[in-house]
Structures are given as structure tokens and as C-alpha cells.
Amino acid sequence: MCKRPSACYSWSRFYLFVFATISVVWIGHTQARPMATAQENPFTGTSFRMDSDGIRVSSRGFEAGARTHWHTHSAQLLFVKEGRLRYQVQGQPVGEIGLHETTYLPRGIRHWHGAVPNETLTHVSVTFPNADGDHLAIEWMEPVGDEQYTNR
Ligand code: MN
């Protein structure tokens, strides 16, 4: 087919180029296709999206030993993103939760929360309005003294 070695070399390079091009296009095509399991409705049974109006999300960092004052506000879910959280609801013992754990503080209940004495904390706070969409104005009270903070 080819009499000169240089011509054979060119043809083999050409076929390699064609093969590589087809491979790249084919791989891109297979990866662009949706997964066989993906469907228009990815739910079994009835499920519907609900609005998240009024839900407030924030994140706060605490150095070791830092904590809020006593306070009240709307119902609050606290999620530990980093570190360890210490908290207390009035009339209950001091509690702690660790990484990726949550605690729920009902609306209007007097409480405080913060880091443990020897580790920093980042928590994510989610506060919820009542059925009418209303939030309680946050009310700050006295600081949490060292004795109370360490009373475990
Ligand atoms: Mn709070």
C-alpha cells in the first residue's frame, strides 16, 4: 500500500488521530447522557415542594469558651458545623452536642449556647416563624457566668 516508509508513517498517524478523535467524542457523548435511573419524577408516592418563607439561616463562629448571653427568640435549630457546642435551656442541665449533631430550642424558651471551653465552634442556626409567619424579636438577658457555664 505504501512504498515509502515515510508514507506508511503518515497513514498510521492519520489512523491514530481518527481513533483518538472518535474516542474523545464517544466518551463525551456517553458522559453527557443522563443516568438511566434519572426520571422526570424522582419521588415514589406524593411529594410536593413547600415554601420556606420566613425561615432564617445564619452561621456564627465562637472561640473556645465563648458563648451567648441568656436570650429568647423564635424556635431555633442549631447544627454543629465545626467543633463542639455547649448549651442550656433554663431549668435543665448544661448539654453538649458534637460535630454534625443538632439541637432544637422551642420558641420563646430561655437559653444560651456557645463553644466548649477547649475547642472552637461554628454553628449554623435556623430559626422558624410561627404559623402566621411571625418571628419573636430576640431578647438579650444577663451573661452566663463561668460557674454556670462549667456546671456540668
Ligand atoms: Mn439562641
Image (cartoon, grey):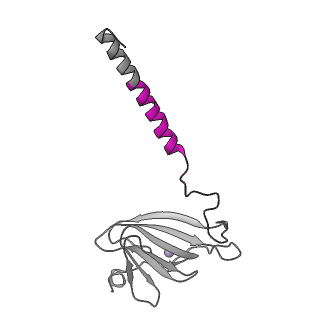
Could you tell me which residue is drawn at 71 percent across and 75 percent down?
132
Is residue 67 rendered to the left or right of residue 36?
left
Q: Is residue 88 above or below residue 23?
A: below
In percent of width and height, residue 135 lies at 63, 73
Q: Is residue 31 above or below residue 112?
A: above
* Residue that protrudes farthest toward the front in the picture: 1
Residue 74 versus residue 44: which sits nearer the camera?
44
In percent of width and height, residue 97 lies at 38, 77
In percent of width and height, residue 36 lies at 55, 54
In percent of width and height, residue 145 lies at 37, 80
Could you tell me which residue is drawn at 65 percent across and 69 percent down?
47
Could you tell me which residue is drawn at 50 percent across and 43 percent down?
30
Q: Is residue 59 magenta?
A: no
Residue 56 lies in what quarter of the image?
bottom right
Is residue 66 rendered to the left or right of residue 79?
left
Magenta-colored segment: predominant secondary structure: helix
Could you tell me which residue is drawn at 43 percent across and 76 percent down?
113
Q: Is residue 31 magenta?
A: yes
Is residue 1 rendered to the left or right of residue 74?
left
* Residue that protrudes farthest toward the right in the picture: 132
Residue 2 versus residue 60: which sits nearer the camera?
2
Q: Quadrant of the C terminus?
A: bottom left
* Residue that protrudes farthest toward the top in the picture: 4
* Residue that protrudes farthest toward the bottom in the picture: 91
Magenta-highlighted residues: 16-37
Disc tally is 0
